[in-house]
């Protein structure tokens, strides 16, 4: 059985070579060929000794993922649907911008968290991805876009990676960390820690581990200013309520490459978007630790009873946060014409809803009083 070299970070590759009596510098050479040049053919790796190339051709491979579909948006966004076997598929999204090109990467086939506003959660959970399957998304996007953009040798197509695709990354920790280390490695993709972001719905214990093992930028899916509402929108809150989550954020900042935590907040019409909710966020976080808000327009999907907040209400909500001194951005919706926008990644995969088909999580409408959902 051949070994997929995309499964190894530097440490893993060094161990794999050492077990076969090869010198450590061979690992570095191979990383350059695979991750910097996008080469899969060992015969073309000219600075490797011929016996080593022959052995690699026999025992190893650079196995990428079959592409089921590749869809392109009018705004330049590209979405790939990758086949990961067993009737499962995952999606990755390339998002070009003036100052950076971002790749949104999946960590699981489906998701077990079940957030009310996310179509991936609605499809249910199938399995964790391997390190190789996570890295393959970056490998394929990088070298596909490098060729399409006509970049010179050494120019990177992807400057930022966000682990915000399908799945909860910190539920797949053992595969995630080697993938992150490859993204950061100067002999592989060479991204800075500030340009690699892990998004979590609030896996408190794993946030603490990540801070020690591989601290990168952290984004937390907040979506509500109080436990009563967050329990409905993000079921994980029932296990790790806001006080626990915010304490973990504060601990993370001792190791983080950025001096702030980004809070993601999906704007849901009549649910969490009132001025009172914004004021509650201010009271919850003012003076606690540095943070910024990323307000995300809700992207509808079939079977959801939720609606996107009107633009005027989003602006009013943002103004409350800005006036209180918080850096606040409203995420520009990208790729929604190809179902590639935030919260829409579900893929053409078998529906694994454990709830009755068509059922939705009941969300009480907002009432105009402080606390809103209390």
Image: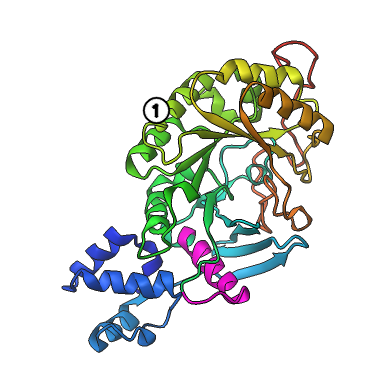
Would residue 362 be seen by someone viewing this image from the given angle? no
| Residue drawn at x 67%, y 68% as measured from the top left | 69
Residue placed under numbered mark 1 in the picture: 251
Q: Tell me, yes or no, whether the highlighted magenta stretch contains residue 155.
A: no
**Residue 210 drawn above or below residue 341:** above
Would residue 293 be seen by someone viewing this image from the given angle? yes
The residue furthest left is: 21
Asked which quadrant contains residue 80, the reply is bottom right
Which of the image's four quarters has the C terminus?
top right
Exactly how many numbered labels are in the figure? 1
| Secondary structure category for the residue under label 1 | helix
Q: Residues within 10 Å of mark 1 (few under 14, many from 20)?
A: some
Where does residue 40 sit, x and y in percent of width and height?
43, 78
**Residue 164 drawn above or below residue 368:** below
**Residue 344 drawn above or below residue 34:** above
Asked which quadrant contains residue 31, the reply is bottom left
Closer to the camera, 177 or 113?
177
| Residue drawn at x 66%, y 52% as measured from the top left | 346
The residue furthest top is: 369
Give the extent of the magenta segment.
134-153
Closer to the camera, 349 or 329?
329
Q: Tell me, yes or no, whether the highlighted magenta stretch contains residue 148.
A: yes
315 vs 200, left or right, is right
Asked which quadrant contains residue 222, the reply is top right
Where does residue 153 sit, x and y in percent of width and height?
48, 76
Q: Main secondary structure of the magenta part?
A: helix
253 vs 345, left or right, is left
47 vs 153, left or right, is left
Closer to the camera, 283 or 87?
283
**Residue 336 drawn above or below residue 78:** above
């Amino acid at each position: 059985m051949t070994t997929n070299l995309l499964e190894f970070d530097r440490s893993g590759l060094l161990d794999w070579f050492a077990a076969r009596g090869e010198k450590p510098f061979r690992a570095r050479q191979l990383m350059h060929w695979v991750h910097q040049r996008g080469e899969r053919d060992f015969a073309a790796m000219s600075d490797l000794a011929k016996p080593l190339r022959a052995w690699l051709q026999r025992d190893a491979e650079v196995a990428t993922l079959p592409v089921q579909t590749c869809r392109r948006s009018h705004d330049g966004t590209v979405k790939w649907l990758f086949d990961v076997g067993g009737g499962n598929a995952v999606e990755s999204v390339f998002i070009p911008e003036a100052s950076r090109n971002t790749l949104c990467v999946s960590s699981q086939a489906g998701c077990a968290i079940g957030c009310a506003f996310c179509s991936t959660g609605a499809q249910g959970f199938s399995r964790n991805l391997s390190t190789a399957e996570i890295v393959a998304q970056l490998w394929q996007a990088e070298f596909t876009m490098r060729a399409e953009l006509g970049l010179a040798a050494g120019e990177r197509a992807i400057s930022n990676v966000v682990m915000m695709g399908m799945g909860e990354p910190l539920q797949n920790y053992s595969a995630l960390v080697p993938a992150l280390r490859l993204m950061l490695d100067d002999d592989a993709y060479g991204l800075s820690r500030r340009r690699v972001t892990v998004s979590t719905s609030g896996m408190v214990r794993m946030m603490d581990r990540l801070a020690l093992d591989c601290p990168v930028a952290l984004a937390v899916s907040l979506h509500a200013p109080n436990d009563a509402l967050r329990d409905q929108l993000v079921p994980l809150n029932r296990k790790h309520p806001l006080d626990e989550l915010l304490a973990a954020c504060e601990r993370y900042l001792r190791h983080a490459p950025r001096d702030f935590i980004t809070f993601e907040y999906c704007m849901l019409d009549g649910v969490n978007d009132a001025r009172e909710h914004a004021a509650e966020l201010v009271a919850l976080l003012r003076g606690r630790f540095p943070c910024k808000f990323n307000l995300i327009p809700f992207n509808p999907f079939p079977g959801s009873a939720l609606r996107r907040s009107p633009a005027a209400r989003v602006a009013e909500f943002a103004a409350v946060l800005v006036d209180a001194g918080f850096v606040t951005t409203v995420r520009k919706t990208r790729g929604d014409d190809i179902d590639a926008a935030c919260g829409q990644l579900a893929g053409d995969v078998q529906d694994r809803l454990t709830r009755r088909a068509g059922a939705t999580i009941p969300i009480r409408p907002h009432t105009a009083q402080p606390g809103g959902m209390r």
